[in-house]
Image (tube, rainbow, N blue to C red):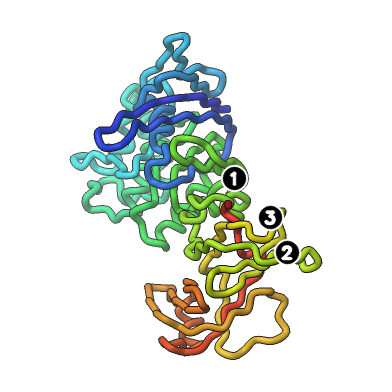
Amino acid sequence: MLDVRLQKTLESTSHAPFKLDVRFETGPGILILFGSSGAGKSVTLQSIAGLQTPDQGCIRAGGEVLFDSSRQVNLPVRQRRLGYVFQNLALFPHLNARQNVAYGLAQLDGAERGRRVDGILAKLQIAHLATRTPQTLSGGEQQRVALARALVTQPRMLLLDEPLSALDLPIKHSIVADLQRINQELRIPILYVTHDRSEALSLGERLLLLEAGRIVADGKPLDVLGQPSRETVANLTGVENLFDVSVASRNPERGTLTCDAGGCNLEIPYGDWPAGKQLRIGLRSGDILIAVAAPQGLSAQNILPGRVQRIDAADYEVSVQVLCGVTFNVMLTRTAADTLSLKVGREVWLIFKAHSCHVLGP
């Protein structure tokens, strides 16, 4: 069990001081620390590891006090028995993969050190890379070496600071699978810092959302990220469509509110807001369907006619802007866009459920 209570102020020459104030407990399993850049995720991780010293608070791991400002306890990093993988990996360029992994085992005799290193290299499927230096490895291979170096010490906790941010999608999926397997085998607390929604949903059993140095949400990743109630979360989770609306009418018999978006009406889930109330609405681009013929017989309560204004193609996805009185951003797979034969100026209909619209606040 990890018990964290910490406060820390970081001074800035260009902004107001940043104040971190977090409190949480966690046991075995993967805990996601999620938030935008500057939210306090990495400072929290560094404070647990002993790389930053909190101003006050207490950090306990497995019943042992790692830090306690009231008792003036502050264990050195090497005594905390934590595995840490940095965003930049911090591999030693002059050492080969095997030497990098063995670096933290200097206190062991040669036979035990070799046994441990061989075991973790095999577990992470990188034994064939043992004699190669970091600069000759791919990004995914370097990541596995860094992970092996953190695990070979048999830590009581693993701290991962955005470890997959520089990797492409197939390699990410492969290492996510490794982390899931490691989690099932070791069942130690694993704190995983990210601002990537897909990583959080695929890895996390629990998610803490940090904003401006505070924990503002705590729950299952799908619960926190799937129903965003704050604009900060919406921006991080692919909610590209944000609208200021006014409640036009209340429809309890339909379970919706009709809202004026300043160019079209939107049906959103029913809530306790009076007519005329100003709200901020978020709608994820992937929750919108496009039809090229007038749809009929649908259960969705938002069916809006419009015209394609812009099309931007990426590797696997196509972003489409559609004007329906206000502009909507829609994300499609490349196959779907090709099937619809979309082009700028084409008349289309947008379709989405009322419950895809998230109220982010007044």
**Image quarter hosting the N terminus:** top right
On screen, residue 249 above or below 122: below
Relative image position of residue 323 (x, y in whole percent):
48, 79
Query: What is the residue that sits farthest to the front in this orientation?
Result: 276
Residue tagged 3: 273
N-terminal-most mark, 3 or 1: 1
Q: Amino acid at mark 1?
A: Glu
Kindly report which numbered mark, 2 or 1, lies closer to the viewer in this rendering: 2
Secondary structure under badge 2?
strand
- Secondary structure at numbered mark 3: loop
The three-letter amino acid code for the residue at tag 2 is Arg
Residue 243 appears at what percent x and percent y?
52, 63
Q: Which residue in the protein does label 1 denote?
A: 205
**Given contact means CB atoms under 8 Å apart, are the residues at marks 2 and 3 in contact?**
no
- Which residue, given by chain and number where applicable, does mark 2 sit on? 250
Name the spot of residue 246 as percent of width and height, x first. 60, 62
